[in-house]
Structure formats: structure tokens, C-alpha cells
Amino acid sequence: MKAAIWGCRGTLPAPGPTTVRYGGNTSCVAVDTADGGLVVLDCGSGLRPLGNALAANPPREVDILLTHMHLDHVTGLGFFALFFMETTVRIWGPRPVTGPLAETIDSYLSPPLFPVRFADIPARIEVTEVSEATWQIGSLSVTAAPVQHPGGALGYRLEEGGRSLAYIPDNELGLDADSGVALATGVDVLFHDAQYTEAEYPSKVGWGHSSLPDFATFVRRTEPGRALMFHHDPQHDDETLEAMRDEASRLAGREIELAAEGLVFDFPGR
């Protein structure tokens, strides 16, 4: 298993320098499996450069795991190069509050929001709704569970060959300290929401994201091998994010890392 980050900010970056160290594109992580499969975690704007990188030698099949349908997690769907090739794309995700997942995706990828009708997209697209469940995608074991986020969202745990990764980009631990704990406990690599400073959080309660103290407590409880702050606030510049990382490390009593586009994680078998 190998994972690469293609996007990790909360929304599109705020006006400012065009080069940032910790993001720009919204949530998207690509996971290469031991049996040659490709699993994509969320379809933020990072899905576009991922698709462009795959276009020269496209895989025949891709599995996409959606955490939820907020725009920062699906805005890249219509710009995924593999949608316009002879590829099978299987999309897994929770049922939105507005109705079936397949119908919601159809509405998003159709006029007036998108110029091409969903039915005319060349790729073969299969949509499956999931909630709390464990299933196999080739050699990869996937576990999904609900987490604390407005309108509902899923977190995921991926396991293969004795290695594991937890992906929980949107989770408000301040409203449910146990949310996501089972998914994250003992994983090799944890990507988890850590969007707000302690001072910012009181004015953001209910927005669906975690404060640094709550994130640090979560890391102490779950004891991942590596813990990365994910879903960065676009209003935070690189220096602010680095200061937040240092504070999170102090609170957790261990090293904390910042998710950044281009980071690659290899998971050799135990």
C-alpha cells in the first residue's frame, strides 16, 4: 500500500502567495494497493491533477471513497480525466440527506451545474451507498464509520498486509470525543481534521471541525504511528500552520506533522 496526498486544505486557498507549502487543492488522497489497484479518498480539487497524472497510462478500474458531498470534497469530480476514458469508476459513499447518492452525483454532474450530462460521461460509473461497514476492494480491507459532521459524513480505515491508514478529514471532536476513535486506534498513519486553534473554535462550534486541543487528545487516545493534521483552514498561512503544528505536538506530547500536497507514504508489509 502506498498513499499520496493531492489535496488537504479545507476550501480553495485565500488570496495571497501562489506557492504554499501545505496545500492549495482541496481534499484528495490516492492509495495504490499491493495488487495494482487504485483507491481515491475524496474528490476535492486535488482530483484534477491526480487524473492528469494518470491520463497517460490510465488504470482500467478506480475506486473512490467519498466522506460526504460537501463541495470541497467533490468539486474535482467533473474534472477527473478518467471520467472521459474507457474506465470503470466505482464510487462508495454515504447517503446524503437530500436523497440517494447516485441521484445527488447525477444532479451535480449535469446541467446547469456541469456542461455534460451525467449519462453522457464515457466512463462506466457505479455508485454504492455505505454506512457503517467493512468490505474488500481487492487486497485492501476498508472500514467505514459515521463521524461528527453537519449533514453526516464517514471516516475510513484502510488495511492491507498488516499496515493501516485512517482518513478522517471532517470530524468535530468537540461535540463527540469518541467520534472516529475506533477507526484510528493503532493505525500506522492518521489523517485527521485539525482546522482550528483553541481561540478560534468557540465561534465555530457546530461547523464540523476540530480544535487543536481536541485533536491532540484524540492522538493520545488512538496512538497512531504517524499523526498528520489535515483539512487546513484556507485563512491560515504556512507560518500559522507551522505554529499550530508545534502547539499540537506540545499538547499531544509527541511529534505531529502537517499534511502537504506531494507527501507520499510507503507501507511495506510487516
Image (cartoon, helix red, strand yellow):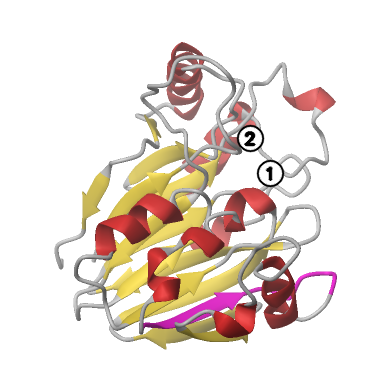
Which of the 4 quarters of the picture holds residue 268?
A: bottom left
Viewer-proximal residue, 47 or 201? 47
Q: Residue at x 80, y 53 (%)?
A: 150
Badge 1, how many Cα within 10 Å: few under 14, some, many 20+? Answer: many
Residue drawn at point x = 35 percent, y = 39 percent: 261
Circles 2, 1 touching at the beta carbon (< 8 Å): yes
Q: Amino acid at mark 2?
A: Asp
Say if 173 sits above or below 123 in the image.
above
Image x and y of residue 33, in percent: 25, 72
Which residue does the image show at 38% across and 71% down from the upper left? 82
Residue 253 pos. (x, y %) = 42, 26
Q: CA distance from mark 2 to mark 1?
A: 6 Å
Q: Is residue 267 left or right of residue 201?
A: left
Q: Position of residue 69 (x, y in %)?
A: 68, 61
Q: Which residue is mark 1?
A: 173
Query: Which structural element holds mark 1?
Result: loop
Q: Which residue is mark 2?
A: 214
User: Quick one: quadrant of the N terminus?
Assistant: bottom left
Which amino acid type corresponds to the residue marked 1 in the rendered image?
Leu
- For the C terminus, the quadrant is bottom left
139 vs 130, left or right, is left
Residue 235 location, quadrant: top right
Whether residue 123 is visible to the viewer of this picture, yes or no, is yes
Range of the magenta residues? 87-98
Q: Is residue 223 visible?
A: no
